[in-house]
Image: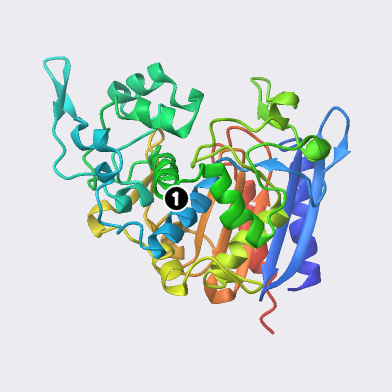
């Protein structure tokens, strides 16, 4: 990569700090299996002015989802299930869930499922499960009442979900929600291992992701960055103050969020995927499984996907694989990159993408909630591609 053009990238990232739009940023680029760029900007916290470091620990939120899907597909490879298997085989209560069918005479109507939820539906967010923030307030209000994120365990979460209706018919729409948390519970049932322990033994330890977990041990707590939001006056305001709660392993270890990690750790995970399921002699998945996961799995009838239901944002060049967003058409997405790139992000303004054609990985991490489509990660992506050396 071209050093002068990487310097452009660094000036742009520093600008977000100077304008006090973000407290701190960590960026990492790998090209052809080597780290081509690693930089940190701003602070881990604005009060103590602790500089952001390469090994700073951050909340990665929904960047946990791809890891959960890898865990499930490892069990798929071991013969525990087929993608077409109904999940009611293991959690019978999902078989009879009603489905929202609209409003008639001022009251919601409910239909039976036209098909059962399968493992494929969970992996592709087409199960009909949603989040309390969904656009359909008739069902979202029911979700809000039971507070799924306040569950004591994955089993407790699932027990709450099976008492709720589905937002849409399974397989009828891409609908972001608790699909991959249910998948995490199925990993527990199939493996006989608590989900957090499965991730630690089967993924984090083998890949050397020593700083990735659902809590931050006491000896590492000084490396945890503070999280921020933008208040009504436009200034950064700290949320989720760092306390002893961050050091205690939680009982609830969801598949869709909750992990702490570092950019360096997440690079190990993404490099494994770019390598076709293996890293440094450790093979987690077969290359054919990785190819299936990182190819658009959605039929044309479900495209374009609705990436933010409450904002009606449609992404015309964007599909979804098994746990990863897929760039099918960079022109339609109006971004730089290659068709076949795969990615995901988190609510705290973090993002990664993998471009197999360019053997390129980009990781952007910050701690701003909600990210609200902040342009910094997208601008980072553009600045990475302009720095590639094509001579």
In depth, the one of 381 and 19 nearer the eye is: 381
In the image, residue 354 above or below residue 103: below
Q: In the rendered view, does 192 fall on the left or right side of 262?
A: left
x and y percent of residue 38 in the render? Answer: 77, 60
| Image vertical order of residue 237 relative to residue 192, above or below | above
**Depth check, front residue: 316 or 229:** 229
| Relative side of 26 to 321, left or right | right
Quadrant of res 374: top right
Assign the C terminus to one quadrant of the image. Answer: bottom right
Residue 287: x and y, percent?
47, 73
Q: Which residue is mark 1?
A: 191
Q: x and y percent of residue 16 in the render?
A: 74, 43
- Which quadrant would residue 45 be assigned to in this image? top right
Q: Position of residue 111 (x, y in %)?
A: 13, 31
For mark 1, give the secondary structure. Answer: helix
> At x 64% / y 20%, what residue is drawn?
232
Q: Is residue 262 above or below residue 278?
A: above
Residue at the spot 43% in from the left edge and 27% down from the top edge: 156
């Amino acid at each position: 990569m071209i050093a002068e053009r990487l310097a452009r990238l660094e000036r742009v990232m520093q600008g977000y700090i100077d304008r006090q739009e973000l407290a701190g940023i960590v960026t990492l680029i790998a090209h052809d299996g080597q780290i081509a760029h690693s930089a940190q900007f701003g602070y881990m916290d604005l009060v103590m002015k602790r500089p952001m470091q390469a090994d700073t620990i951050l909340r990665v939120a929904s960047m946990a989802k791809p890891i959960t899907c890898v865990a499930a597909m490892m069990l798929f490879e071991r013969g525990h299930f087929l993608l077409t298997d109904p999940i009611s085989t293991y959690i019978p209560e999902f078989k009879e869930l009603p489905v929202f069918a609209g409003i008639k005479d001022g009251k919601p109507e409910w239909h039976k499922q036209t098909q059962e939820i399968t493992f494929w539906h969970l992996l592709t967010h087409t199960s009909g499960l949603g989040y309390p923030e969904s656009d359909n307030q008739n069902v979202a209000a029911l979700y809000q009442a039971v507070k799924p994120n306040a569950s004591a365990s994955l089993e407790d979460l699932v027990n709450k979900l099976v008492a709720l209706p589905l937002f849409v018919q399974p397989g009828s729409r891409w609908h972001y929600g608790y699909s991959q948390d249910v998948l995490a519970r199925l990993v527990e049932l199939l493996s006989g291992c608590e989900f957090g322990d499965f991730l630690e033994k089967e993924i984090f330890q083998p890949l050397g992701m020593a700083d990735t977990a659902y809590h931050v041990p006491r000896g590492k707590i000084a490396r945890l960055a503070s999280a921020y939001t933008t208040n009504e006056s436009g200034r950064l305001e700290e949320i989720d103050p760092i306390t002893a709660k961050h050091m205690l392993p939680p009982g609830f270890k969801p598949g869709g969020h909750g992990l702490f990690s570092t950019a360096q750790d997440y690079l190990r995970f993404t490099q494994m995927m770019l390598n076709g399921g293996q890293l440094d002699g450790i093979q987690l998945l077969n290359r054919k499984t990785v190819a299936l996961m990182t190819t658009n799995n959605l039929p044309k009838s479900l495209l374009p996907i609705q990436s933010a239901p409450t904002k009606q944002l449609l992404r015309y060049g964007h599909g979804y694989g098994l746990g990863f967003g897929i760039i099918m058409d960079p022109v339609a997405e109006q971004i730089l990159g290659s068709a076949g790139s795969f990615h995901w992000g988190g609510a705290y303004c973090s993002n990664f993408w993998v471009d197999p054609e360019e053997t390129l990985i980009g990781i952007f991490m910050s701690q701003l909630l909600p990210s609200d489509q902040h342009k910094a990660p997208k601008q980072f992506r553009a600045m990475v591609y302009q720095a590639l050396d094509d001579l």
